[in-house]
Amino acid sequence: MIVFEGSEGAGKSTQVARLTARLRQTGVEVVATREPGGTATGEAIRSILLAPDGHAMLPATEALLYAAARAQHVGELIEPALARGAVVVCDRFVDSSLAYQVGGMGLPLAAVEAIQPLATRGIEPDLRVLLDLPVDVGLARRFQRPDDLNRLDLADIGFHLRVRETYLALAAAHPDRWLVVDATASPERIGTVVADAVGELMGVTGGSGR
């Protein structure tokens, strides 16, 4: 499973689509999905989590809702796809909870980590791709589409800075698990870097999709 992570405006959805298209050209079955979402239940939870007027939501409520959406996502979509040998390409996974709810919101790391195993069923990404860029650049991209802004886009700048710092710390702590890519580069350049890394990974793992 390949997971794209990053702050707002990093271009994750663009790179999910690019990688999915490249892999499908090789004849591989690819399941492209996102969090929160990927299932009817997950998309319903997503609408609650990202509603621009949901500012009264408590951090603990937010963390539990993300975990609930993830549990449905894994059980209904991700686990069956991996079991049949498909490659799953996902926009966000557990590390988003660590970056946003722990780093951004200040929840205890142990508490957020404790609720993840029930949701993930032990599934871990084979590669985490961190699309990293300065916070002001990412937010400027998001605010170019004012009709598409969500609750997290509208958070204060300190929140977004903490999210980015947490992502970078996660990647630095486990560099073997992460590919950090400069998200200020062109989408074409980013896509090539990611495709090369994924190709190498699949060559090592035999293209298992896990």
Image (cartoon, rainbow, N blue to C red):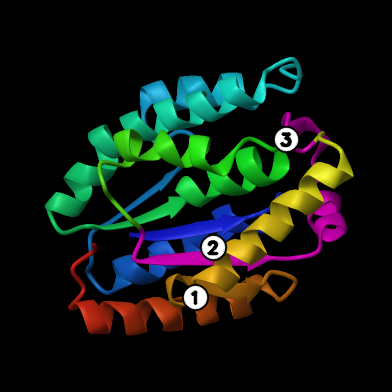
Residue 196 lies, in percent from the top left, at 44, 83
Q: Earlier in the sequence, mark 2 or mark 3?
A: 2
Q: Amino acid at mark 3?
A: Leu
- Residue name at image x 63 percent, y 59 percent: 167
Q: Image quadrant for the C terminus?
A: bottom left
Residue 195 lies, in percent from the top left, at 44, 77
Quick one: SS at disc 3?
A: loop
Viewed as shown, does residue 117 lie left or right of 33?
left
Q: Image quadrant for the N terminus?
A: bottom left
Q: Compared with residue 44, is residue 100 higher up or lower down, i.e. above or below? A: below
- Residue name at image x 44 percent, y 77 percent: 176
Q: Compared with residue 82, is residue 46 higher up or lower down, i.e. above or below? A: above
Q: Nearer the viewer, mark 1 or mark 3?
A: 3
* 152 drawn magenta: yes
How many callouts does the rendering have?
3
Q: Nearer the viewer, mark 2 or mark 3?
A: 3
- The numbered dot on residue 15 is 2
Disc 1/disc 3 C-alpha distance (Å): 26 Å
- Residue name at image x 42 percent, y 52 percent: 90
User: Which residue extends farthest left?
Assistant: 84
Quick one: SS at disc 2?
A: helix
Residue position marked by numbered label 1 in the rendering:
194
Residue position marked by numbered label 3 in the rendering:
152
Residue 68 lies, in percent from the top left, at 41, 26
Tell me whether the residue at label 2 lies in contact with that at label 1, contact meaning CB atoms closer than 8 angstroms: yes
Q: Amino acid at mark 2?
A: Gln
Magenta span of residues: 125-153
Quick one: SS at disc 1?
A: helix
Residue 26 lies, in percent from the top left, at 27, 74
